[in-house]
Amino acid sequence: MDRKRLAAGGIDYDSGAARCGSESLYESLLSQYGSCVASPEAIRSLWEAADYEQLKMVVHNLKGTSGNLSIQTVFRLSARAMELLRAQDYTALSQVIPDLEQAQAAALSAIGG
């Protein structure tokens, strides 16, 4: 995997590989990331439908998975989105969702999925 491309997508390769214990395991898990989490389009669709309960479940999964794989930008934004969903602060959340979508798209592109 192209580490420079991963870094541009908000992914901390060294941290993720250290967490997994091996580069090969980390790369295998990264390659599966896109099939385990919501796409940017799915996030947008739930947001536009005001399906906040489902959005909360999707963002929670995204937060955990991105955190475990050191996909830092997605993790940071999904953590913020979770705070706002729990607080039911949908006005502030409207500012975070586009950034989260963009970060998720960048991460998926960097991984190649």
Image (cartoon, rainbow, N blue to C red):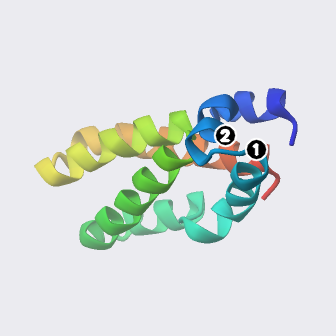
Q: What amino acid is found at the position of numbered circle 1 in the picture?
A: Glu
In the rendered view, would you say 18 is above or below 89?
A: above
**Which label's residue is closer to the chain start, 1 or 2?**
2
Q: Residue at x 12, y 48 (%)?
A: 87
Callout 1: few (<14), some (14-19), or many (20+) C-alpha neighbours within 10 Å?
some
User: Which residue corresponds to mark 2?
Assistant: 17
Element under label 2? helix
User: Which residue corresponds to mark 1?
Assistant: 23
Element under label 1? helix
Q: Which mark is residue 62?
A: none
> Quadrant where the C terminus lies?
bottom right
Judge by depth and name the residue closer to the eye, 109 or 67: 67
Q: What amino acid is found at the position of numbered circle 2 in the picture?
A: Ala
Callout 2: few (<14), some (14-19), or many (20+) C-alpha neighbours within 10 Å?
some
The image shows residue 74 at horizontal and vertical percentages of: 51, 42
Q: CA distance from mark 1 to mark 2?
A: 5 Å
Q: Residue at x 32, y 45 (%)?
A: 81
Residue 1 lies in what quarter of the image?
top right
In the rendered view, would you say 59 is above or below 9?
A: below
